Image (cartoon, rainbow, N blue to C red):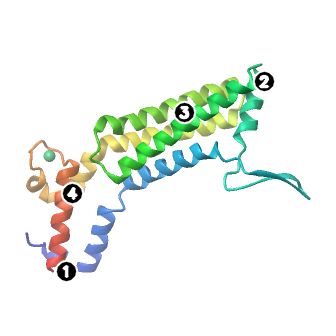
Amino acid sequence: MPLTEKQREHGLIFRFFFWTEHYLRMENILYSFWSVFWLLNGFDKFFNGTLRATDYGTVSFGWFGVNRDDKMIHYFSRLDLPEGLALFSLYSVAILEIVIGILFLCIFVSRRIPTFVQRLAFKLSMLVFFVFSIGDILFGDRAELWEHGTFMILTLVTFKMYLETPSIRKSVVGKRFQEFDVNEDGQICEVEYSAYMDAIESELEQQ
Ligand SMILES: [Ca+2]
């Protein structure tokens, strides 16, 4: 498949655009963000750092700043709920967060994993923010409620992008759409998109 005149003229620039379209996709950025976000937040609950007395008072040292154990026990005690329940809730959510992080990591690595698994990652994310928001209201932490609300919106934005991915691919493939829409369903699936990218790459190599 020959390159267009324009593509040949701007070889290097075209290669750069190819790289951004192939690897630096918005979906890749967002999926890696959610993967890191959930994994770090999940592990944050297991690593609380160590408290040390300093000239400025007692300071927590360690990679993960917030001591969630104390915070959660304090929240639950306000509602006369036991410490055990506070820690059980905290670590259950932490495990769920790590699971969501792994799911997003799988989606980031391969877009070919079953679509119900992909949608599950979004559904679980929304459910966790839903539960957090209820907690924020009951425990009276309005700042956290706001924070969780913004992440809820970003989850919805990412989900919208996930649903619109076929039209994003369509705009990248452009004029060659018919050629790569192999099953003629009017959409470019991940397999068809990879075929398009492979074709472009081999054309670049032949240059
Ligand atoms: Ca198709």
Distance between mark 1 and mark 4 Cα atoms: 24 Å
In front of the other: 72 or 161: 72
Q: Earlier in the sequence, mark 3 or mark 2?
A: 2
Q: Name the quarter where the C terminus is drawn.
A: bottom left
Q: Secondary structure at mark 4?
A: helix
Please give left or right for residue 123 compared with residue 87 in the image.
left
Label 2, on which residue? 78
Mark 2 element type = helix
The CA span between labels 1 and 2 is: 69 Å
Mark 3 or 2: in front is: 2
Q: CA distance from mark 4 to mark 3?
A: 34 Å
Which numbered marker is on residue 9?
1
What's the amino acid at mark 3? Answer: Phe
Query: Is the residue at mark 1 in contact range of ligand 1, meaning its CB lies under 8 Å from it?
Result: no
Pointer 1 or 4: first along the chain: 1
User: Does the residue at mark 3 contact the one at mark 2 (Cβ under 8 Å)?
Assistant: no
Q: CA distance from mark 3 to mark 2?
A: 21 Å
Are there few (<14), some (14-19), or many (20+) residues within 10 Å of tag 1?
few
Residue at which label 4 appears: 194
Indicate the secondary structure of the residue bearing disc 1.
Answer: helix
Residue 129's mark? 3
Please say if the residues under marks 1 and 2 sit with CB atoms less than 8 Å apart: no
Where is residue 109? Give x, y as percent: 35, 53
